[in-house]
Image (spheres, grey):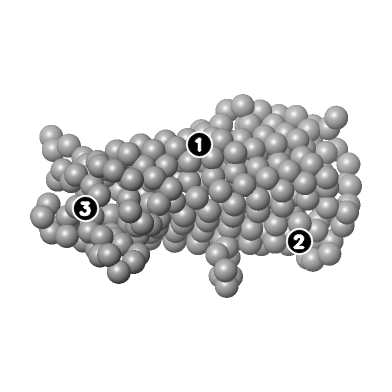
């Protein structure tokens, strides 16, 4: 059986690299030499993939990258099928606009992971910078489908303007779910002002910081939707799935906008 295609990072890249070329359809039928010649630089230096990586040809069902860097941008851009595994860190816009397949990163990632994705699965072993699953500047929406799992801490504005999909994070900064249009965020702890200006969607959290003043308290609930959500969350974070079994205190908002969103947390 043919093994996975491998790229081993030889040294820290001299500049930010655009790794959107590492995509099964674009590499199909291309030899090692041609792959090594692919342009991945962002300056006039003219950096090629082979300048930074040792490339070993293999099956494209799975692509393995050994050694990471915060300078590796746009990995998995538009991914539709197959699996990319990265041992190490990644830069910004990981999985940007992906529609299927899987991306697994053992380390931490830069901002805008999963922005504009419509499907697929992304798992981050470490932390994620600001705007995980959030909209890039000028975009109408952030995450539009699929699942992002962040094992560590995510920064501010997780799921900003997300339209659908699921984000699971151990911990997040302030403004989680800001301007959410729809979708679901499940987290252990979120910072201040979760759900700021959200229109629809659900935030299910163990603990949160200061609530947005324009949310209204609606009492303690046991919601059918949450029991269905539990099954999806249990696949990736069994300890967070336990939240669904508790009596949940519900705040509705943000009433400064459409106000059909909700913040759910265990009743203290």
Displayed quadrant of residue 267: top right
Residue 246: x and y in percent read 75, 29
User: If the image is split into quadrants, where does the C terminus sit?
Assistant: top right
- Number of numbered labels in the structure image: 3
Secondary element under disc 3, as helix, strand or loop, is helix
Relative placement, left or right, of 54 versus 9 is left
Q: Viewer-proximal residue, 10 or 114?
A: 10
Which residue occupies 56% across, 48% down? 129
Q: Is residue 183 visible?
A: no
Q: Earlier in the sequence, mark 3 or mark 2?
A: 3
Crowding around mark 1 (Cα neighbors within 10 Å: few <14, some 14 to 19, many 20+) is some
Crowding around mark 3 (Cα neighbors within 10 Å: few <14, some 14 to 19, many 20+) is some
Q: Of discs 1 and 2, which sits in the foreground?
A: 1
Relative placement, left or right, of 59 versus 184 is left
Relative placement, left or right, of 39 versus 186 is left
Residue at numbered disc 2 = 197
Q: Is residue 88 visible?
A: yes
Q: Of discs 1 and 3, which sits in the foreground?
A: 3
Residue at numbered disc 3 = 51
Which residue occupies 77% across, 46% down? 192
Separation of residues labelled 3 and 2 (CA atoms): 46 Å
Residue 42: x and y in percent read 35, 64
Q: Which mark is residue 216?
A: none
Separation of residues labelled 1 and 2 (CA atoms): 28 Å
| Image: 238 above or below 54 | above
Q: Residue furthest bottom?
A: 138
Q: Which mark is residue 126?
A: 1
Which residue occupies 58% across, 58% down? 134
Secondary element under disc 1, as helix, strand or loop, is loop
């Amino acid at each position: 059986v043919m093994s996975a295609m491998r790229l081993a990072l030889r040294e820290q890249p001299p500049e930010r690299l655009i790794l959107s070329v590492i995509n099964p359809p674009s590499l199909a039928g291309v030899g090692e030499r041609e792959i090594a010649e692919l342009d991945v630089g962002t300056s006039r230096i003219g950096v090629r993939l082979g300048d930074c990586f040792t490339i070993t040809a293999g099956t494209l069902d799975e692509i393995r990258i050994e050694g990471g860097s915060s300078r590796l941008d746009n990995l998995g851009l538009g991914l539709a099928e197959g699996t990319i595994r990265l041992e190490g860190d990644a830069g910004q816009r990981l999985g940007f606009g992906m529609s299927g397949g899987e991306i697994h990163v053992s380390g931490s990632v830069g901002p805008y992971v999963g922005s504009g994705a419509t499907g697929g699965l992304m798992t981050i072993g470490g932390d994620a910078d600001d705007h995980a699953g959030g909209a890039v500047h000028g975009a109408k929406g952030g995450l539009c489908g699929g699942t992002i799992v962040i094992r560590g801490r995510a920064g501010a504005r997780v799921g900003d303007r997300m339209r659908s999909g699921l984000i699971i994070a151990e911990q997040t900064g302030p403004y989680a779910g800001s301007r959410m249009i729809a979708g679901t965020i499940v987290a252990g702890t979120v910072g201040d002002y979760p759900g700021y200006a959200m229109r629809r969607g659900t935030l299910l959290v163990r603990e949160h910081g200061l609530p947005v003043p324009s949310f209204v308290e609606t009492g303690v609930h046991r919601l059918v939707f949450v029991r269905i959500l539990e099954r999806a969350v249990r696949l990736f974070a069994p300890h967070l799935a336990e939240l669904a079994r508790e009596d949940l205190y519900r705040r509705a908002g943000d009433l400064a906008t459409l106000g059909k969103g909700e913040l759910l947390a265990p009743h203290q």
